[in-house]
Image (cartoon, rainbow, N blue to C red):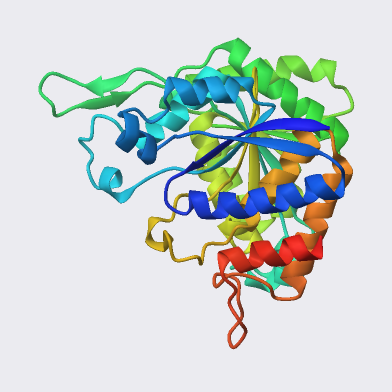
């Protein structure tokens, strides 16, 4: 099979971890007799520096023509430290989601047996954890009207959702639950927020279409607590944009490292696959960043975008092997053991495929 993949390395450690994902993807393509054409494009701070905008039209065209998008990370300290910056890298990410119609972020959280004690949570709390968040990506407070009043002393951010936006996200949640343990949790704040009440009544109305799925409704603060107490009590969780942003980062520490968790953003056009970590600017160019989340995101791409489960399993198997044998970057290396460079981890994975 032939694939055309848009390659958005982005900022900070993005180019470094993307490079290793490309190496592994090319090795998989060779092993299984596929052909990949990579289409690099600018986004984030590097795009602002080059052309003045964080998500150029040329980049969007490349993404629209691609079979999938493999994405690194965006963000730069010069923008993080300047709240008044008129153009910011993160605006590119929001615009990309909007223009590509990426309304559902799929974030799995699972544990690795060889790293179970790396988690800040007790082993008995997290063993067997295998859950998936579906976070709505193109609505809510991030996309609502925002601004400051004339006196400059009052700011506002409006949270707005339509029933159709909730329905399309919930539909994916129900469908995913049907392929797993048929448990779905709707996360909201319906005791306070009108948008959450819309979420809850919309999902309740859809229950009849999925009679095999057991649905629970929980407030976001309760879920935040239970994620660190009994994370394996959850399977599929659906929620709005802001809640999902916060909860998925909280859930990521269950595995022991944000450098291990992949994600996908799917919707109306080309799907995008990316690690959940940020651009980690302090490590830029040092060849120490953990590439495994990006490589596992490529595995998600092979399985979900291309329907190639054997290829995805081959990537996951060799990643597990690297963890078991301690071929890891400094964030996962145990005391007294070797910390491998980013590129060395990628080379080892390719050799062992």
- Asked whether, in this view, residue 195 is left or right of residue 152, the answer is right
From this viewpoint, is residue 5 visible?
yes
Where residue 132 sits: x, y (%)?
71, 42
Q: What's the residue at 69%, 44% (across, down)?
A: 298
Where residue 146 sits: x, y (%)?
31, 21
Look at the picture and state if 42 lies above or below 169: below
Q: What's the residue at 40%, 35% (across, down)?
A: 90
Direction bottom: furthest residue: 336
- Would you identify the image quadrant in which residue 3 lies? top right
- Asked whether, in this view, residue 84 is left or right of residue 69, the answer is left
- Asked whether, in this view, residue 312 is left or right of residue 117, the answer is right
Where residue 84 sits: x, y (%)?
20, 35
Q: What's the residue at 68%, 35% (across, down)?
A: 37
Locate the N terminus by quadrant.
Answer: top right
In the foreground, 107 or 219: 107
Look at the picture and state if 246 lies above or below 190: below
In the foreground, 100 or 247: 100
- Asked whether, in this view, residue 309 is left or right of residue 89, the answer is right
Locate the C terminus by quadrant.
Answer: bottom right
From this viewpoint, is residue 138 visible?
no
Where residue 227 sits: x, y (%)?
63, 52
Q: What's the residue at 77%, 34% (across, down)?
A: 304
- Would you identify the image quadrant in which residue 106 lies? top right
């Amino acid at each position: 099979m032939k694939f055309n993949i848009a390659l958005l390395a982005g900022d900070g450690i993005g180019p470094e971890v993307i490079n290793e994902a490309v190496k592994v993807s090319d090795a998989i393509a060779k092993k299984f007799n596929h052909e990949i054409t990579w289409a690099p494009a600018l986004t984030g701070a590097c795009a602002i520096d080059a052309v003045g905008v964080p998500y150029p039209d040329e980049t969007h065209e490349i993404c629209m023509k691609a079979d999938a998008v493999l994405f690194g990370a965006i963000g730069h300290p010069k923008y993080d430290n300047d709240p008044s910056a008129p153009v910011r890298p993160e605006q590119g990410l929001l615009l990309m989601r909007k223009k590509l119609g990426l309304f559902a972020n799929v974030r799995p959280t699972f544990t690795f047996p060889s790293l179970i004690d790396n988690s800040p949570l007790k082993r008995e709390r997290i063993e067997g954890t295998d859950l998936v968040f579906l976070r709505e990506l193109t609505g809510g407070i991030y996309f609502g009207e925002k601004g400051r009043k004339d006196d400059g002393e009052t700011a506002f951010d409006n949270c707005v959702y339509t029933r159709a936006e909730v329905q399309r996200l919930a539909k994916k949640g129900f469908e995913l639950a049907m392929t797993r343990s048929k448990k779905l949790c709707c996360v909201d704040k319906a005791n306070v927020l009108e948008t959450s009440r819309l979420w809850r009544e919309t999902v309740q109305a859809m229950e009849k279409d999925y009679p095999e799925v057991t649905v629970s409704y929980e407030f976001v603060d309760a879920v935040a607590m239970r994620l660190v107490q009994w994370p394996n009590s959850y399977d599929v969780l659906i929620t709005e944009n802001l809640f999902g942003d916060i909860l998925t980062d909280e859930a990521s520490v269950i595995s022991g490292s944000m450098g291990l968790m992949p994600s996908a953003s799917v919707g109306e056009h080309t799907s995008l696959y990316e690690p959940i970590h940020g651009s980690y600017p302090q490590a830029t160019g040092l060849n120490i960043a953990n590439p495994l989340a990006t490589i596992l995101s490529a595995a998600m791409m092979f399985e979900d975008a291309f329907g190639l489960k054997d290829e995805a399993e081959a990537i996951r198997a060799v990643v597990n092997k690297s963890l078991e044998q301690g071929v890891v970057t400094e964030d996962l290396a145990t005391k007294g053991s070797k910390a491998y460079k980013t590129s060395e981890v990628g080379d080892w994975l390719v050799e062992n495929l």
